[in-house]
Image (cartoon, rainbow, N blue to C red):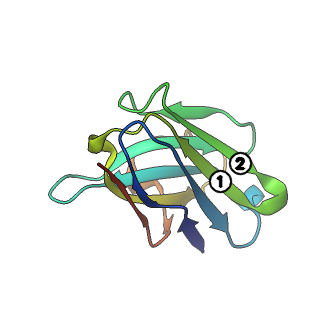
Amino acid sequence: QLVESGGGSVQVGGSLRLSCEVSGSIDGTNCIGWFRQAPGKEREGVANIYTNGDITEYADSVKGRFSISQDKAKNAIYLQMNSLKPEDTATYYCAADTSVGRLCLLEGYQYGVWGQGTQVTVS
């Protein structure tokens, strides 16, 4: 089970840090990703992290502004979002790929466990 938190409303240029709490151990996953979906738009992969190795990947739209990290002691994944823009407004979801050993992609179909989402509004 994944539970997101940390969403809210922020001004353009502001920052937010999203958290994703993982039930059980992060070590039981292959990678964890953050996705977002705005009304009327397709879901977009934002960032992911290999839970064994800290390798990360970002969508071009957030490179240099967002940072994904993990804290295994807390079984948590974080998404630090800086220099927020109105186009970052969306519901953000964390998701886990539990197929250990395969290549992590920013493609939603690869992730079998999803959180309920947290809303981020930038204005």
Tell which residue pokes out farthest to the left in this image: 40
Residue 1's tag is: none
Label 1, label 2: how many angstroms apart (C-alpha)? 4 Å
Name the spot of residue 116 as percent of width and height, x first: 45, 73
16, above or below 26, in the image: above
- Res 118 visible: yes
Apparent side of residue 72 relative to residue 98 in the rendered image (left or right) = right
User: Label 2: how many residues lie within 10 Å, few (<14), some (14-19) or many (20+)?
Assistant: some
Apparent side of residue 62 relative to residue 90 in the rendered image (left or right) = right
Nearest the eye: 100 or 11? 11
Tell which residue pokes out farthest to the front in this image: 11
Q: Secondary structure at mark 1?
A: strand
Residue occupying image coordinates x 44% and y 33%: 83
Residue occupying image coordinates x 77% and y 56%: 27
User: Label 1: how many residues lie within 10 Å, few (<14), some (14-19) or many (20+)?
Assistant: many
Residue occupying image coordinates x 60% and y 74%: 1
Q: Which residue is mark 1?
A: 77
- Res 106 visible: no
Name the spot of residue 23 as percent of width and height, x first: 69, 73
Residue occupying image coordinates x 77% and y 65%: 25
Apparent side of residue 84 relative to residue 64 in the rendered image (left or right) = left
Q: Amino acid at mark 1?
A: Ile
Q: Amino acid at mark 2?
A: Gln
Name the spot of residue 31 as percent of width and height, x first: 61, 49
105, above or below 2, in the image: above
Q: Secondary structure at mark 2?
A: strand
Residue 70's tag is: 2
30, above or below 64, in the image: below
Quarter of the figure with residue 40: bottom left
Label 1 vs 2, first from the N-terminus: 2
Name the spot of residue 99 as percent of width and height, x first: 60, 55
Whether pointer 1 and pointer 2 mark residues with C-beta atoms closer than 8 Å, the reply is yes
